[in-house]
Amino acid sequence: MKTKEEVFTLIKKTVNLPGEINDYQLRLSSGRFERENLIGIYKIRRGIATRQENFKLAEQMSFLLIGLENDTGILLKGANIYGKNYFGMYYLSEDWNKVIGYLESEVDENGNLIN
């Protein structure tokens, strides 16, 4: 397993996270996610977001689905990153070497997600 610092560095290379690891809380999943199940879940969630006219979220889920569908692995790992005004949920390869896809959101002063 990679260290939190290594996973943070990999994620930071993938997305433009300002600051350093000490500016965030990072939680790595101890379990695994089945890629095919995630594809089904996020297709449903994308449809719900579209019907609710939350097009920004639907677009993010479309990009996540592209990453999930283009990956060949069966199982994925997860990481959540919390910052002052940021939340990101990332899916990584089972060996923690590649970011497969992610969802990001802003967080208000009460810790509520803003889509």
Image (cartoon, grey):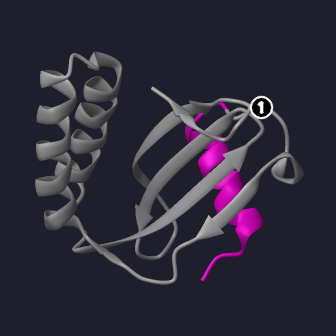
Task: Locate the N terminus by quadrant.
Answer: bottom right
**Is 5 drawn above or below residue 3 in the view shown?**
above
- Quarter of the image for residue 28 reads bottom right
**Is 74 drawn above or below residue 64 in the view shown?**
below
**As drawn, is 14 to the left or to the right of 103?**
right
- Quarter of the image for residue 93 reads bottom left
**As drawn, is 12 to the left or to the right of 55?**
right
- Bounds of the magenta segment: 1-16
The residue shown at (29%, 33%) is 63
**Is 75 drawn above or below residue 80 in the view shown?**
below
**As drawn, is 104 to the left or to the right of 52?**
right
Secondary structure of the magenta portion, mostly? Answer: helix
Residue of label 1 = 18
Residue 7 place in picture, x, y as percent: 64, 62
Q: Secondary structure at mark 1?
A: loop
Residue 15 place in picture, x, y as percent: 58, 35
Assess whether residue 71 is covered by the magenta stretch: no
